[in-house]
Image (cartoon, rainbow, N blue to C red):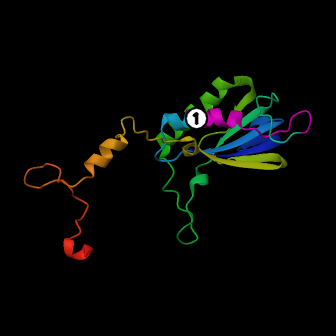
Amino acid sequence: MKAIIQRVASASVTVDSQLVSSIGKGILVFAAVDRDDTPRDAESMAAKVLKMKMWPDDSGGPWKHSVQDISGEVLCVSQFTLLASTKKGNKPDFHGAAGGEKARELYDRFFAKVQELYSQERVRNGVFQAMMQVGLVNDGPVSVEYHSTDAEVTLEIQTNPAKPQEKARDAEPTDASTGQRKEGAGSFEMTKSLLE
């Protein structure tokens, strides 16, 4: 999943001239579901947006407090256009975005997880797949882009490495017919004529 997280003084969603949701100080989260996303992506992104440090602390130190730290509000809005590709031509390509049912399922899971990890009363939603008018007052301005794959880390650890002595012996030449190590292999003998 991909998200644009904006620090706002206020934000709102209107559909068909009707106010659907509104918040005061907090974050507006535009979220898009990739075709390769899984429930794990939805849940990890929910945790990330709530932990993102976007406000200063009481002494003015920047990037110290999250929306939870300031008891702010959250407005989530689905926006598949975040996944547009513009590599070819001037028309956006949205093939990277998930299809309708999968996108709805994972977006709903993301929204529900944000509510679960924070507070239902402080988390608001837009209307999935609706034509929305989103109003906001960006505070800063501050906007942060995040992709759920940014959290993936893969480590490969060799738990049974060969010992240095074993490596050295393995590197010694062997006789192809007997499989035994050749004595004196890797060295040469100087003939008597060369020494005279």
Residue 170 in view, yes or no: yes
Is 59 a magenta residue? yes
The image shows residue 103 at horizontal and vertical percentages of: 51, 42
- 16 vs 184, nearest the viewer: 184
The image shows residue 47 at horizontal and vertical percentages of: 63, 32
- 132 vs 41, nearest the viewer: 41
Quarter assignment of residue 192: bottom left
Q: Residue at x 46, y 46 (%)?
A: 36
| 185 lies left or right of 83 | left
Q: Residue at x 36, y 35 (%)?
A: 160
Residue type marked 1: Ser
Q: Residues within 10 Å of mark 1 (few under 14, many from 20)?
A: some
| 37 lies left or right of 117 | left
Q: Which residues are magenta?
A: 43-60
Is 175 a magenta residue? no
The image shows residue 153 at horizontal and vertical percentages of: 52, 41
| Quadrant including the C terminus | bottom left
Q: Residue at x 26, y 61 (%)?
A: 187
The residue beneath circle 1 is 44
- 194 vs 60, nearest the viewer: 194
Q: Residue at x 65, y 30 (%)?
A: 114
